[in-house]
């Protein structure tokens, strides 16, 4: 089984001839990628990564993950943007956080928390408070090694670690993931002797989930990273096929057809809370890759059915510049049947014998019909189960489609010149020399 892209719900908005007309353009974009001759081609390391990754480093990642779980109850992952979203997405998707925090019990509980994703003092104070007297380790992740948010958080948490375990003890609990040669973090890690993992030179932050950037926190969370890589590798082979049998190319083509027809916002929709951060990861991937030169589809996301009660009105009736891409998980790992009551006071007996997932799926179907009638084209991505294997497939699907889509749009999908503007002002205001 594989993940599947289905554009049939959007048929009334896109003719087959329009899709067919994209074929030569997609073939040209795919050639630029495969021949490594397009803009940003120095950053195509992710393309073959699932098939050609560094086996020795992968083994070291698994060993470090095991060591972290043995030495600590909490792993503080410090990183921002592409240096945290993939790991956060994978952990939430594969081992979703229960709405009520788990406490104690006889089994030791292991938590992964994310710091350095913002500059909020109360946020970081709450993390420190939540760690309390539990043993913790740090995985600090920054490709450039110079990003302010994670650097500030690392200084804070390193100090706590050194106070608790001494400088030598702290060294044994700090894992750095950074550039192989450059940056302040690399210098610091070498000087202090931290165990270090590499962000390959030819893999940009938002394409780095299948390197140590994503893999170490994900493995430390107890998730099967072999399965994750296997899923990505399966799709890396499959998405070399020609347009007619290539879901990934078709998604890239269809979103560009919709964009050319005035649909300039893509809403990633889910009906399972575990997908929330997959959409956050996807937003960075597409937003940073395509939003430049005055162009690009604006990537946004909603969590249904919750957001049907807040954003539903706009989607149904507001400006007609939207299309939706719906993530659908076909088989949930658990389900409940609703029972019948003799008085039917809540009026729900018509649902007796139906499962919660069945009701959720009907909500999705009804919403798809309503939004389509309201002028919002719907695309669907079906995921057989919420497992690391299918998530690996999904990660690679979105990465390759993003690169092809960026070339169709005529931008360099691998740079992010716009991210520097706020930093320049912030550094000037902070008096950085
Ligand atoms: O995709 C990107 O390159 C960026 O969003 C980076 O991931 C983000 O700015 C963090 O950078 P770094 O890993 O260098 O700290």
Image (spheres, helix red, strand yellow):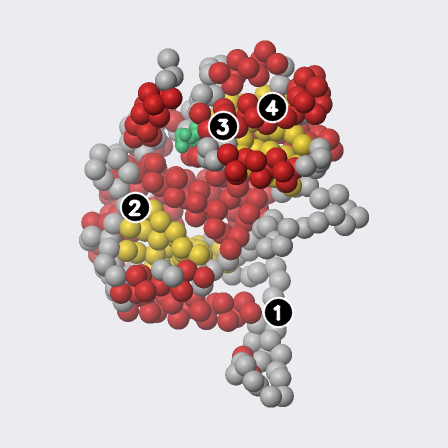
| Residue at 39% across, 51% down | 301
Q: Which residue is mark 3?
A: 150
Say which residue appears at 62% left-offset and 19% top-offset.
Answer: 194
Q: Does any portion of residue 257 appear in the rendered image?
A: no
- Residue in view at x 57 percent, y 60 percent: 332
The earlier-in-sequence mark between 3 and 4 is 3
Residue 254 percent across, percent down from the top left: 29, 51
User: In the rendered structure, which disc, 3 or 1, sits on the residue that comes first in sequence?
Assistant: 3
Q: Alpha carbon of mark 1 to alpha carbon of mark 4: how far?
A: 45 Å
Q: Measuring from the top left, give residue 329's x and y in whole percent.
A: 50, 58
Q: Secondary structure at mark 2?
A: strand
Q: Secondary structure at mark 3?
A: helix
User: Label 1: which residue?
Assistant: 336
Residue 372 as seen in the image, left or right of residue 151: left
Sort mark 2 into few (<14), some (14-19) or many (20+) by Cα contacts within 10 Å. some
Name the residue beneath numbered marker 2: 298
Determine the image quadrant of residue 224. top right
The residue mark sitting in front, 1 or 4, is: 4
Q: CA distance from mark 2 to mark 3?
A: 26 Å
Residue 371 in sight in this render:
yes
Q: Give the structural element (helix, strand or loop) at label 4.
A: helix
Q: Is residue 107 above or below residue 43?
A: below
The alpha-carbon separation of the residues under discs 3 and 4 comes to: 11 Å
Q: Name which quarter of the figure residue 190 lies in.
A: top right
* Mark linked to residue 158: 4
């Amino acid at each position: 089984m594989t993940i599947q892209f289905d554009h049939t719900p959007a048929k009334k908005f896109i003719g087959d001839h329009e899709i067919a007309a994209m074929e030569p353009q997609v073939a040209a974009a795919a050639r630029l990628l495969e021949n490594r001759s397009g803009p940003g081609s120095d950053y195509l390391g992710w393309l073959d990564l699932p098939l050609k990754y560094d086996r020795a480093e992968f083994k070291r990642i698994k060993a470090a993950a095991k060591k972290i779980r043995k030495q600590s109850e909490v792993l503080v992952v410090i990183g921002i943007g592409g240096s945290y979203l993939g790991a956060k997405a994978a952990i939430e998707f594969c081992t979703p956080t229960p709405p009520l925090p788990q406490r104690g019990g006889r089994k030791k509980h292991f938590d992964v928390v994310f710091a350095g994703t913002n500059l909020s003092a109360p946020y970081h104070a709450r993390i420190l408070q939540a760690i309390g007297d539990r043993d913790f380790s740090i995985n600090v992740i920054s490709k450039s090694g110079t990003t302010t948010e994670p650097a500030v958080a690392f200084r804070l948490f390193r100090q706590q670690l050194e106070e608790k375990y001494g400088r030598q003890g702290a060294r044994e609990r700090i894992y750095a993931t950074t550039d192989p040669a450059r940056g302040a973090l690399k210098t610091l890690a070498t000087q202090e002797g931290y165990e270090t993992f590499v962000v390959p030179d030819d893999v940009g932050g938002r394409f780095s989930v299948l390197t140590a950037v994503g893999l170490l926190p994900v493995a430390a969370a107890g998730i099967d990273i072999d399965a994750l890589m296997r899923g990505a590798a399966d799709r890396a082979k499959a998405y070399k096929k020609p347009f007619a049998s290539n879901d990934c190319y078709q998604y890239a083509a269809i979103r560009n057809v919709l964009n050319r027809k005035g649909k300039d916002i893509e809403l990633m929709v889910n009906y399972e809370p575990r997908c929330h951060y997959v959409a956050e990861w996807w937003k960075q991937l597409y937003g940073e890759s395509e939003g430049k030169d005055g162009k690009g589809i604006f990537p946004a996301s909603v969590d249904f059915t919750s957001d049907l009660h807040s954003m539903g009105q706009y989607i149904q009736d507001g400006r007609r510049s939207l299309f939706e891409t719906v993530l659908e998980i076909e088989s949930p790992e658990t389900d409940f049947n609703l029972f019948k009551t003799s008085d039917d006071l809540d009026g729900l007996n018509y649902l007796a014998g139906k499962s919660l997932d069945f009701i959720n799926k009907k909500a999705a179907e009804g919403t798809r019909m309503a939004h389509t009638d309201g002028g919002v084209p719907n695309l669907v991505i079906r995921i057989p189960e919420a497992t690391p294997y299918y998530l690996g497939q999904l990660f690679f699907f979105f990465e390759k489609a993003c690169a092809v889509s960026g070339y169709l749009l005529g931008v360099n999908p691998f740079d992010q010149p716009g991210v520097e503007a706020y930093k320049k002002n912030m550094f000037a205001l902070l008096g950085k020399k």
